[in-house]
Image (cartoon, rainbow, N blue to C red):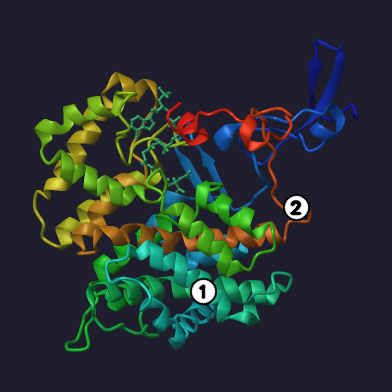
């Protein structure tokens, strides 16, 4: 190892061997041990279920300091972006690495606007779903099906096709999501309108009807735009890692984003916003809060305080702070006084943040804790909440996917394992096998 290089030595006290592990340092944040050659040199794997201490890639897109509660996209703090930027500008920032000039912003906005419609044939795919299907099931299906329609942007080795696919995905997600909602309530689809902004368009496609003029509320459109910004990217979370892993096999971009949507749907991840509202409704009143907080501490009870805790943030999620402020603005705009769910959420946060268990485990509200209150107040159905998360996160997914494809050391993702199953054994003819049913033994062990 060259003298100026920092490294750790791994010492095998059984055989006396030692291995030097190079240390890589980034712009900011923890250094990493580069174990690329560990198995080749030592025959050892590392073990890290849930990847709590593992960096899966190098990235320039998003930086999170979980201890300080810091989130930056391409170096810009999330609070500054939420206050001063707009979602289209943040999409450009994530994809291209810096804030756009006025000319670039207009060109980008036009590129997105001109891809907002979807192939009419896809409407027949919606009809294959039950009317009551969860809209995330429709999102997974329809977004995956885009690869059957847009063959001119599936060649992942062509930078131009990569960019068109990224634009198409950002542009079409609101259309596909709003259509899933309209399908579920049996109303006609509303086509995108080029004269509206991205977020105004979404609200129009969600709530306009052919029988009367629909005027988009600018305050609510701004709140939705902020919602999309706050959800746009978040480093190597579960769904982004899913997109990267799918992309590492050179799968087409539409299939990769469909995989990301599927992963986001889980209540431990993007499905938490829907779960928070259901939890607050179940709590029902402030005097029941302590009962649920105690339940969430009980290891034998699967109940967790939804919208609380985070793998990375061991401080207040900066997005939750902005979301909380936006919730007050939206309720005021809609003249909703003393929203019962907001009252419970505020009291729950106050109690939890002063509770020994939550303090010791550093559990704070995350992005999902207040977001549902905003969406519910706007009349967006609970089962659409994660769809909106997916719409915002598509900007991050396509940016991370593009970065992965363009990474000079791109490799197919293929983790190993610690095998703890049966060692080698010979085949047993049926008459020589144990009488106890394998099913019973495994199922009721
Ligand atoms: C998102 O990764 C991302 O960046 C995700 C995201 C993004 O933008 O992409 O930020 C979006 O997914 C936000 C998280 C939304 N999920 C929820 O709100 C669901 C509730 N939260 C928990 O399920 C949990 O906090 C996780 C899944 C978010 C994080 O789980 P970890 O990192 O695996 O932490 P853990 O489960 O090991 O918890 C550590 C301890 C445990 O107790 P011990 O075993 O140490 O005794 O804290 C406890 C947990 O039991 N704990 C909770 C809790 N969350 C963790 N106890 C009660 N309520 C909770 N919510």
At a point 55% along the width and 80% down the height, the residue shown is 107
Within 10 Å of the Cα at label 2, are there few (<14), some (14-19), or many (20+) other Cα atoms? some
- Secondary structure beneath dot 2 equals loop
Foreground: 333 or 397? 397
**Can residue 40 be seen from the camera position used here?**
yes
Within 10 Å of the Cα at label 1, are there few (<14), some (14-19), or many (20+) other Cα atoms? some
> Viewed as shown, does residue 212 lie left or right of 313?
left
At a point 20% along the width and 52% down the height, the residue shown is 328
Q: Estimate the spatial distance between the alpha carbons at disc 1 and disc 2, rounded to whole Å.
A: 26 Å
Res. 380 image quadrant: bottom left
Query: Compared to 293, does 142 lie above or below?
Result: below
* Spot occupied by residue 100 in the image (x, y as percentages of width and height): 55, 68
- Please give the residue where the numbered disc 1 appears in the rendered image: 145
- Please give the residue where the numbered disc 2 appears in the rendered image: 411
Q: Ligand 1 within 8 A of label 1's CB?
A: no
> Viewed as shown, does residue 304 lie left or right of 342?
right
* Spot occupied by residue 93 in the image (x, y as percentages of width and height): 55, 62
Query: Compared to 106, does 6 lie above or below?
Result: above
> Viewed as shown, does residue 344 lie left or right of 74?
left
In what quadrant does ligand 1 lie? Answer: top left
* Spot occupied by residue 413 in the image (x, y as percentages of width and height): 69, 49
Foreground: 119 or 336? 119
> Viewed as shown, does residue 50 lie left or right of 353?
right
Res. 14 image quadrant: top right
């Amino acid at each position: 190892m060259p003298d100026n290089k920092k490294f750790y030595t791994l010492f095998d006290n059984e055989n006396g061997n030692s291995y030097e592990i190079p240390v890589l340092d980034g712009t900011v944040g923890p250094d990493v041990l580069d174990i690329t050659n560990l198995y080749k040199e030592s025959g050892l794997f590392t073990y890290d279920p849930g990847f709590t201490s593992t960096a899966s890639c190098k990235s320039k897109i998003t930086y999170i300091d979980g201890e300080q509660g810091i989130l930056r996209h391409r170096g810009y703090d999330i609070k500054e972006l939420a206050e001063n930027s707009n979602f289209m500008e943040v999409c450009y920032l994530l994809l291209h690495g810096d804030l756009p000039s006025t000319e670039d912003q207009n060109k980008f906005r036009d590129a997105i606007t001109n891809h907002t419609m979807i192939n009419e044939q896809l409407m027949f795919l919606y009809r294959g779903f039950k009317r009551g299907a969860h809209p995330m099931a429709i999102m997974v299906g329809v977004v995956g099906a885009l690869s059957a329609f847009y063959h001119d942007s599936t060649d992942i080795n062509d930078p131009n096709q990569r960019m068109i696919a990224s634009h198409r995905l950002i542009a079409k997600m609101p259309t596909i999501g709003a259509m899933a909602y309209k399908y579920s309530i049996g109303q006609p689809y509303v086509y995108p309108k080029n004269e509206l902004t991205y977020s105004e368009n979404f609200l129009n496609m969600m709530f306009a009807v052919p029988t009367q003029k629909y005027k988009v509320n600018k305050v609510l459109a701004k709140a939705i735009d902020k919602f999309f910004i706050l959800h746009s990217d978040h480093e190597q979370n579960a769904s982004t890692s899913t997109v990267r892993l799918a992309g590492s096999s050179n799968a087409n971009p539409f299939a990769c984003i469909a995989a990301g949507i599927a992963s986001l749907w889980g209540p431990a991840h993007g499905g938490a916003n829907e779960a928070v509202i259901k939890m607050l409704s179940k709590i029902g009143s402030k005097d029941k809060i302590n009962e649920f907080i105690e339940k969430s501490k009980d290891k034998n009870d699967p109940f967790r305080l939804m919208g609380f805790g985070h793998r990375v943030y061991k401080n207040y999620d900066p997005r939750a702070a902005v979301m909380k402020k936006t919730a007050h603005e939206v309720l005021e705009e809609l003249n909703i006084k003393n929203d019962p769910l907001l009252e419970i959420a505020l009291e729950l946060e106050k109690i939890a943040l002063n509770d020994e268990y939550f303090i010791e485990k550093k559990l704070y509200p995350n992005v999902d804790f207040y977001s549902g209150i905003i969406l519910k107040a706007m009349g967006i159905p609970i089962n659409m909440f994660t769809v909106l998360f997916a719409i915002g996160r598509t900007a991050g997914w396509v940016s991370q996917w593009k970065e992965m494809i363009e990474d000079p050391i791109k490799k197919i993702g293929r983790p190993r394992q610690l095998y703890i199953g049966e060692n080698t054994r010979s085949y047993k003819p049926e008459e020589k096998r144990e009488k106890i049913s394998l099913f019973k033994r495994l199922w009721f062990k």
